[in-house]
Image (cartoon, grey):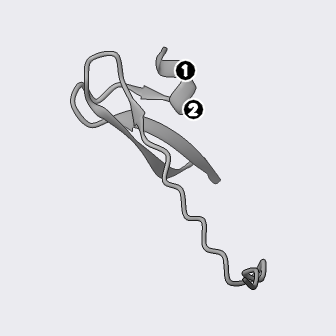
Amino acid sequence: MGQISKNARTASLTQRFYCPCGGEIKMKTIFSSGKVRNMAECEKCHRQERRPRDFK
């Protein structure tokens, strides 16, 4: 049986983060004071943090 080449393999993984309140965390890009910043925001309680892991 032949093996699959490394270029033919497709591994798409979407990681989902959840807030303690039960809402899903979405990443947003905000342009403020001349800088582009990535912010994580909960859809349910609208809490904002720098990274998804800061919600713990």
Task: Identify the residue at image location x=49%, y=45%.
Answer: 15
Q: Is residue 2 left or right of residue 52?
A: right
**Label disc, if present, on residue 26 of the rendered structure:** none
Q: Residue furthest left?
A: 44
Q: Nearer the viewer, residue 17 or 42?
A: 17
Q: Nearer the viewer, residue 28 or 11?
A: 11
The residue indicated by pointer 1 is 54
Image: 5 above or below 38: below
Q: Amino acid at mark 2?
A: Arg
Image: 26 above or below 52: below
Task: Identify the residue at image location x=24%, y=25%.
Answer: 45
Q: Tag count in the figure?
A: 2
Q: Amino acid at mark 1?
A: Asp
Q: Is residue 23 left or right of residue 48?
A: left
Q: Nearer the viewer, residue 43 or 32?
A: 43
Residue 29, horizontal then vertical, whole percent: 50, 53
Residue 5, horizontal then vertical, whole percent: 77, 83
The secondary element bearing badge 1 is classed as helix
The secondary element bearing badge 2 is classed as loop
Residue 6, horizontal then vertical, whole percent: 78, 77
Quarter of the view holding residue 12: bottom right
Task: Identify the residue at image location x=76%, y=80%.
Answer: 3
The residue indicated by pointer 2 is 51
Task: Identify the residue at image location x=54%, y=20%.
Answer: 54
> CB of mark 1 within 8 Å of CB of mark 2?
yes
Residue 50, horizontal then vertical, whole percent: 56, 31
Query: In what quadrant of the picture does the N terminus appear?
Result: bottom right
Separation (CA) of disc 1 from disc 2: 6 Å
